[in-house]
Amino acid sequence: MALHFERSEFNNRMARLLAKMQEEKLDAILLFAQESMFWLTGYDTFGYCFFQTLVVKSDGTMVLLTRSADLRQAQLTSVISDIRVWVDRVNADPTLDLKELLVELDLLGARIGVEYDTHGMTGRVARLLDNQLASFGQIVDASYLVSRLRLVKSLAEIAYVERAAVLADDALDTALALIKPGADEADILAAMQSAIFSGGGDYPANEFIIGSGPEALLCRYKAGRRKLDDNDQLTLEWAGAYVHYHAAMMRTVVIGDPTHRHRELYNACLETIQAIETVLEPGHTFGDVFDTHAKIMDERGLTRHRLNACGYSLGARFSPSWMEHQMFHAGNLQEIEENMSLFVHMIIMDSDTGSAMTLGQTYLTTSQAPRALSRHRLEFLNR
């Protein structure tokens, strides 16, 4: 088996899940999020783009319902022993297969949680599922049950996060060696991804973000490449990924002579992220982190140029996004606990002057001050 954790680690995770299910009075839960399946069993696939679900009963029984293409995938990469296959065919409705499985598992009339808020649950699947289970039992939304359990990392997980952070640093090193007037974004992007693969890393759960000139103000990947001008700006957001665990970073590099506005925005980013480091510890909430961000940015007249979130939890994630559900935004009462891996980003996009500035890195929370996982300092980058 291609397991990345000891059996005892999976047993501990199952115990935590069952305890939470008991607290929520769930007789079973249907897992549709690939990261939930990976966390609980090691199951590693991109087959969640099709229908599949892992049924977990309150007694610890597990059954995976998937397609034939993922049968061996589950056998090789997971601790799941009971794997059922639904058959691809015209007008196939795998939720009917699921209903029959639930009957077999003696769950008729049971209280069943469902992970609805995930990329593994399309709108069509949700409608089919609800139609099949409408009178089957008590169906409740359990979208964030496993997600919240995954917030606090074990020592084994932390080792993978730390390795991912090394790979993220390696990617930045390769990028900085290439960034100069006339450099091609394609070469920079290729070098960054190559550094991660060469270090034994994985594909990230979403594309690296790269943009220069006016496109440095974009917060998402887009197709197309350009070469850097003598005076330019380049925004990069990327993540090292190792065993699917991510450590993200973000930087804006100024090429040529920095403008006064670039310096001004960088100072705001640095001051804010340093202030956040003082509240990124137990005793504070995710909302407190955002409030710190908003207060400093707003006092500097940057309300229109900042975002409405300044980071999120990171962990083992699958496409199309490495972002966890738990984000730093207004009113988030999620408490900060020890051993969380959290990405803090400062993003200022000033469309009035066409100036971009970003600063971001991943932290591991401790009982006190957080530990930055990057070896790079939060310095102004100028090439």
Image (cartoon, grey):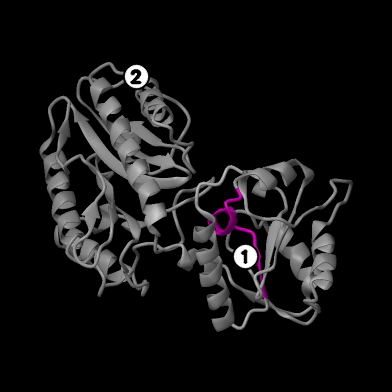
Marks 1 and 2: which is nearer the front? 1
Tell me the residue at 72%/42% (across/down). Answer: 72
Q: Secondary structure at mark 1?
A: loop
- Asked if residue 314 can be seen in this view, the reply is no
Q: Quadrant of residue 344?
A: bottom left
Question: Is residue 279 depicted above or below 267 in this figure?
Answer: below
Question: Circle 2 is placed at which residue position?
Answer: 184
Query: Given the image, on which type of amino acid does mark 2 rest?
Result: Asp
Quarter the N terminus occupies: top right
Quarter the C terminus occupies: top left
Q: Verify whether residue 184 appears in magenta.
A: no
How far across and how far down the image is residue 13, in percent? 51, 64
Q: Dot 1, how many residues are within 10 Å of its Cα: few (below 14), some (14-19), or many (20+)?
A: many
- Looking at the rendering, the stretch of residues picked out in magenta corresponds to 28-43
Tell whether 271 sits left or right of 88. Answer: left
Q: Quadrant of residue 301?
A: bottom left
Q: Quadrant of residue 137?
A: bottom right
Q: Dot 2, how many residues are within 10 Å of its Cα: few (below 14), some (14-19), or many (20+)?
A: some
Mark 1 and mark 2 in contact? Answer it, CB < 8 Å.
Answer: no
* Rendered image: mark on residue 374: none
